[in-house]
Amino acid sequence: MSLPHLADPAGRYRAMRLIRSFEELALEWVRSGLIVGGTHPYIGQEAVAVGVCAALDPADRLTSTHRGHGHVLAKGADPARLLAELAGREGGLNRGRGGSMHAADFSLGILGANGIVGAGAPIAVGAAWAARQRGEPTVVASFFGDGALNQGVLLEALNLASIWRTPVVFVCENNGYATTLPAGAAVGGSACGRAAAFGIPAETVDGMDVEAVRAAARRAVERARSGGGPSFLECLTYRFEAHHTMERRFRLSYRTAAEVASWRERDPLVAARADLPGADTIDTEVSQLLARAAVFAQESPVPDPSSAADFLYASGLRPRSGATL
């Protein structure tokens, strides 16, 4: 049983269109000041999130990254509540406390985005191990970028996943850059070579093709669910926008316009939309959905400053009186 909203090409296109339009709206809100602190746009990488999530069941889980809006939306999160979260409002997924880099929805198996590079991988391994101990047929997908390939915590997670044969699908979104550093200048060997060193089956896939990603992810998920252990997917993709919205202010020039343009010619939404009946209707529906989401987010109240110490602990305890936050 896969995620119902991603079960057919129309549903997968709709999810990619939702992610693209949501990110474009978020960029507008950053510029207007409705979102404070900026975001890491996911524009261009939509096929990875949707393709992987299309292979997951509703009870499966995922861990995300600082560039996580696409993963969260693809798994089924409410765009209105995600937008409210980015705007720091009480109606947000995490009552405005998480913001852009820490959105989570445990009810949907979204264990959280993470601002620390590679930090979602050990969480995914732990969650998968715990589910197996409980006898649950749960698979956990762990997203990370090429910048995480040299992080020790990712290598430790790969090692444990291999030893324990945990049902994890490691998804490397290789967009060619770790912030401004080209992957070719930072990664010795290869992404798949990292996994192979731990005996984990690895595959490189076209991350601009949602159906190619879905097919590879299905193989990996089926392997994990049947007890075959972890797999590793390297999805070759590209972000069309800046690493972070602050980048424009600094006028960084580590990519040429020609390079960006050549990748835009492979826009995953254009490919998914081709010959798809009802695509215009889907676009209109998504636009209307986000218009309602914008109203919800703006009408949602900001948190009361007196509640700043709430939710720091899972138990509900508050810091001691007089403690400095």
Image: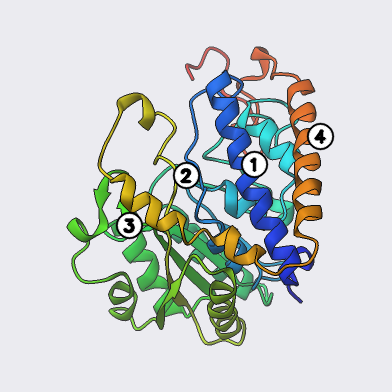
Q: Are marks 1 and 3 in contact (CB under 8 Å)?
A: no
How far apart marks 2 and 1 lie (CA) works out to 16 Å
Q: Residue 115's quadrant in the figure?
A: top left
Q: Which residue is mark 3?
A: 176
Q: Position of residue 279 (x, y in %)?
A: 75, 59
Q: Earlier in the sequence, mark 2 or mark 1?
A: 1
Q: Earlier in the sequence, mark 4 or mark 2?
A: 2
Q: Nearer the viewer, residue 250 or 74?
A: 250
Q: Secondary structure at mark 1?
A: helix
User: Mark 4 packing: few (<14 Cα in 10 Å), some, or many (20+)?
Assistant: few
Q: Which residue is mark 2?
A: 66
Q: Is residue 111 visible?
A: no
Q: Earlier in the sequence, mark 1 or mark 4?
A: 1
Residue at 47%, 40% (x, y): give it.
Answer: 40
- Count the numbered circles shown: 4
How far apart marks 3 and 2 lie (CA) works out to 16 Å
Q: Is residue 77 left or right of residue 183?
A: right
Instruction: Indicate which label's residue lies in the foreground, 3 or 2.
Output: 3
Could you say which disc has been placed on residue 292 in the image?
A: 4
Q: Earlier in the sequence, mark 1 or mark 3?
A: 1
How far apart marks 4 and 2 lie (CA) works out to 25 Å
Q: Nearer the viewer, residue 65 or 291?
A: 291
Q: Is residue 134 visible?
A: yes
Classify the position of the N terminus by image quarter.
Answer: bottom right
How far apart marks 4 and 3 lie (CA) works out to 35 Å
Q: Is residue 303 above or below residue 289?
A: above
